[in-house]
């Protein structure tokens, strides 16, 4: 029995276009050691890069505009987000999954506010108030977990 499941596909910056549903797979971190931080003199001044997974799920974002290296996207509640593609690795997600997510999160926010889930408009939903940090785009600071 074979079932075709949608899969996130990493994106090259030049493949981004308005209307596309995306998510953040990794944050790209950089660190340049200073003299005295390491005993190895070869490491001084060389930038070290690594990928870091988000600590919380990043919701599907819809691309509104692209001006490389910046991407303007909206979260499921229509809140604009600016992403710098030098600092993130993006993936394209399935349109049906993104639509389902938007529908569910809007219904949850409306339920918590006591509104009609079909109503579209402004909300006073802060980042993470519709769930456990689901709207956080940047990685969390170390909170001692």
Image: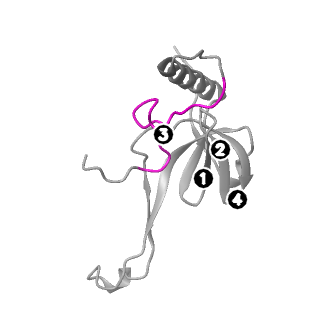
Identify the mark at residue 33; answer none if there is no mark.
none
Q: Secondary structure at mark 2?
A: strand
Instruction: Determine the residue positioned at 66% across, 24% down.
Output: 120
How far is disc 1 from disc 3 in space, using C-alphas?
A: 16 Å
- Whether label 2 touches label 1, CB < 8 Å: yes
Q: Secondary structure at mark 1?
A: strand
In this rendering, would 135 be left or right of 73?
left
Per the rendered image, the range of residues in magenta is 120-139
The residue where tag 3 is placed is: 127
Q: Earlier in the sequence, mark 2 or mark 1?
A: 2
User: Going from the N terminus, do you reach mark 3 or mark 2 first?
Assistant: 2
Residue at the spot of label 2: 73
Packing grade of label 4 (10 A; few <14, some 14-19, many >=20) is few
Q: Residues within 10 Å of mark 3 (few under 14, many from 20)?
A: some
The residue under the point 66% across, 28% down is: 121
Of callouts 1 and 3, which one flags the residue occurring earlier in the amino acid sequence?
Answer: 1
Local secondary structure at mark 3: loop
Which of the two discs, 4 and 3, labels the residue nearer the N terminus?
4
> Camera-side residue: 93 or 62?
62
User: Is residue 89 covered in magenta?
Assistant: no
Residue pointed to by mark 4:
68
Residue 93 found in image quarter: top right
| Quadrant assignment, res 7 | top right
Question: Of tags 1 and 3, which is closer to the observer?
Answer: 3
Q: Where does the image place residue 29, in percent across and percent down from the top left? A: 45, 61
Q: Which residue is mark 1?
A: 83
Q: Nearer the viewer, mark 4 or mark 3?
A: 3
């Amino acid at each position: 029995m074979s079932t075709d499941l949608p899969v996130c596909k990493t994106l090259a910056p030049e493949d981004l276009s308005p209307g596309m549903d995306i998510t953040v797979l990794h944050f790209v971190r950089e660190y340049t050691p200073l003299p005295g931080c390491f005993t190895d003199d070869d490491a001084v001044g060389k930038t070290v890069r690594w990928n870091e997974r988000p600590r919380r799920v990043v919701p599907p974002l819809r691309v509104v505009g692209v001006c490389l290296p910046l991407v303007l996207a909206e979260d499921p509640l229509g809140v604009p987000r600016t992403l710098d593609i030098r600092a993130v690795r993006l993936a394209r997600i399935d349109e049906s999954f993104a639509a389902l997510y938007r529908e569910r999160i809007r219904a949850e926010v409306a339920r918590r506010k006591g509104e009609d889930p079909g109503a579209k408009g402004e909300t006073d939903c802060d980042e993470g108030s519709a769930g456990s940090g689901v709207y956080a785009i940047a990685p969390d600071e170390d909170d001692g977990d």
